[in-house]
Image: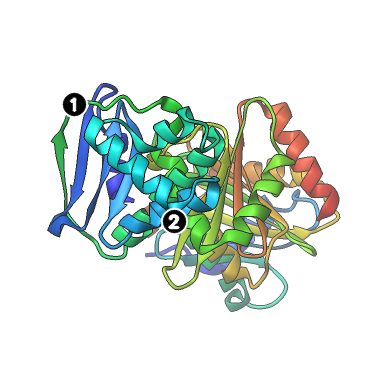
Amino acid sequence: MDALLRVEGLGPDDCGLLSFAGSSGGIFVERGRICWVAARGLQQRLSDLLRTHGSVDSAKLDRIYQRCRNEGTLLGQTLVAEGLLQPVELEHALRHHSAECLVALCRASQATIWASHPGRGYAPRFTFRPLDLLFDSVALLYPNLRLEALEELSAYRGPGRHAVAFVLDAELGALLPLAETGESSVESVSTLARSLLSIPRASHELGMTPAFALSTTANGDTLLVWWRKQVLYAMACEDRASLIAATSQHLACA
Amino acid sequence: MSPPLLHLGECVAGACAAVPGLQEAALALLPEGLLLGGVGEGRDFDREPLVRCAARSLCGAGVTSTLSTRLTTFVEHLFVGHEQLIVILRGVRYPRLALALSCTKDTNPAFVMSSSRSALRSLETTLDLAAWEV
């Protein structure tokens, strides 16, 4: 999480590598977006994922890899340009690989060092927001809950509505972000996770699992909070009417 | 000398009389979760879950909504259970005060919230809490 917060804190024109201590891996960033994440021991994994997602065999992949290396071009984008991989397949493979590497890198707390490098011209489509990779990393640990959360959130999607789903990880004693509707950031989602933890703890004191809760902050924002199994959802609405409509949906089921 | 607890209990009962479907109410001091006075069935000890709920939910980490990154705190909660409504309010004039109430489920949550806010406002106006260092 700290590494992603650091990436999020970079300037909009920054390009470079955020390395983890001990050369265990790094995150390559171009213009505030993550191009790839690499972790020691998972280099071969990207090739495996590219083969799984696309229709390219090992021999061909090796030949193109060598050619890209000699020419200084980007492997993934070359595979797409030559029709060996669909753009969406490359996107999925890169996101999956980056998420696996992030999970590996974040098993232990490690210092990070930023070094600026010239940009390599990654197509924006194949680069990702830090928050997207955070969601993908948590989804690796809770794949079924992520699908359920996306389905639940889709029922509440609407203009001016911002919702985030968190899974309650009992071992860590923390809420881990799974999915969102709206445009949040790693910083806002992690702060929200820390503060929302007081709500399940408070309801535990009452010896009940509420159907839902409405929680208001000192600056007047009201969050609609509800639970489904291990997943806690929090939604804020820009207008009161939208909040009332969403609350009524819950009240009808309570 | 501290105000007598019996007197505070009567004040809480009077202030909360207009809350529809009231089962019990507790006025507490944060962050300690010290019960100052309560009303409802049972003894003061039975109000402990309400008080602990208030302490937990109002004294957590700073909060941002998903709409803004401005750090703030929770000041109100309405928990809608399958049998009860639970209201937790932080004092406006005295942020160390918390009023926690439970009401029957069949009551209108909007009425419960507005009458609970009035009850806390009334308590903040009438009670002399100087002895509690509030």
Mark seen at residue A48: 2
Residue B66 lies, in percent from the top left, at 51, 37
Q: Secondary structure at mark 1?
A: loop
Q: In this view of the protein, can residue A97 be seen by the observer? A: yes
Mark 1 belongs to which amino acid?
Pro
Judge depth for marks 1 and 2 and give the one in front.
2
- Same chain for the residues at labels 1 and 2, yes or no? yes
- Work out whether mark 1 precedes mark 2 in sequence or the reverse, and give the earlier one: 2
Pick the residue in front: A124 or A206.
A124
Dot 2 falls on a residue whose secondary structure is helix
What is the tally of numbered marks visible in this picture?
Answer: 2
Quadrant containing the N terminus of chain B is bottom left
Q: Is residue B6 left or right of residue A151?
A: left
Q: Which image quarter: residue B70?
A: top left
Q: Mark yes or no: residue B72 visible.
A: no
Give the residue type at disc 2.
Answer: Asp
Q: The numbered mark 2 sits on a residue in which chain?
A: A
Q: Quadrant of residue B103?
A: bottom right
Q: CA distance from mark 1 to mark 2?
A: 28 Å
User: Where residue A118 is drawn, which disc sits there?
Assistant: 1
Left of A246 or right of it: where is A85?
A: left
- Front-most of residues B115 and B57: B57
Residue B46: give x, y in percent of width and height. Answer: 62, 76
* Residue drawn at point x = 61 percent, y = 26 percent: A238
Asked if B84 appears above or below A161 in the picture, the reply is: below
**Identity of the residue drawn at 43% across and 58% down:** B30
Residue A193 versus residue A161 in the image, above or below: below
